[in-house]
Image (cartoon, grey):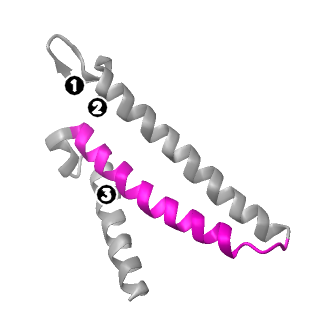
Amino acid sequence: YVNERVAFGEPISNRQAVAFAVSNIGIELEGMRLTTLRAASRADQERDFSNATAVARQLCSEKGMAIGSDGVGLLGGHGFVTEYPVERWYRDLRAAGLMEGALLV
């Protein structure tokens, strides 16, 4: 969408703020992936993985919500229509966050 949406005669993906937001999403996704793989690796090696799992869960929960919010923001009004999957992802992240909070009570 950011490559297709044109503002001021050029795609919004050419805007520095949009490019930074998209690259930050990629960086955060990679960090989440690596943290999760580290926890899984410790479990596979039959080492204590409780701390690694807690770190991965917390990081993925926080960063997932931030990524979902940024994704909706990048799409603007289109972020809330079912035409784009980011709408569903954001709703699912919000629901998971609410369930996680309820489990901690």
Crowd band around label 2 with a 10 angstrom C-alpha radius: few (<14), some (14–19), many (20+):
few
In three-dimensional space, the C-alpha distance between marks 2 and 3, rounded to whole angstroms, equals: 16 Å
Q: Mark 2 vs mark 3: which is more N-terminal? A: 2
Disc 3 residue crowd, few under 14, some 14–19, many 20+, Cα 10 Å? many
The residue beneath circle 2 is: 1
Position of the C terminus, as image quadrant, is bottom left
Q: Position of residue 35 (x, y in %)?
A: 63, 56
Q: Quadrant of residue 30?
A: top right
Which residue sits at x=45%, y=63%? 61
Dots 2 and 3: beta carbons under 8 Å? Answer: no
Magenta residues, dominant SS class? helix
Q: Residue sitting at 30 percent across and 27 percent down?
A: 17
Q: Amino acid at mark 2?
A: Tyr
Q: Decide: marks 1, 2 in contact (CB < 8 A)?
A: yes
Magenta residues (range): 46-75
- Where does the image place residue 50, in percent across and percent down from the top left? 68, 76
Above or below: residue 43 compared with residue 82 = below
Residue 66: say if magenta. yes
Asked whether, in this view, residue 48 is left or right of residue 24, the answer is right
Residue 63 is situated, as x and y percent measured from the top left of the image, at 43, 54
The residue most toward the top is 9
Q: Is residue 44 magenta?
A: no
Q: Position of residue 80 (x, y in %)?
A: 18, 51
Q: Secondary structure at mark 3?
A: helix
Q: Amino acid at mark 1?
A: Arg
Three-letter code for the amino acid on which mark 3 is drawn: Tyr
Q: Which residue is tagged 3?
A: 90
Tag 2 secondary structure: loop
Q: Earlier in the sequence, mark 3 or mark 1?
A: 1
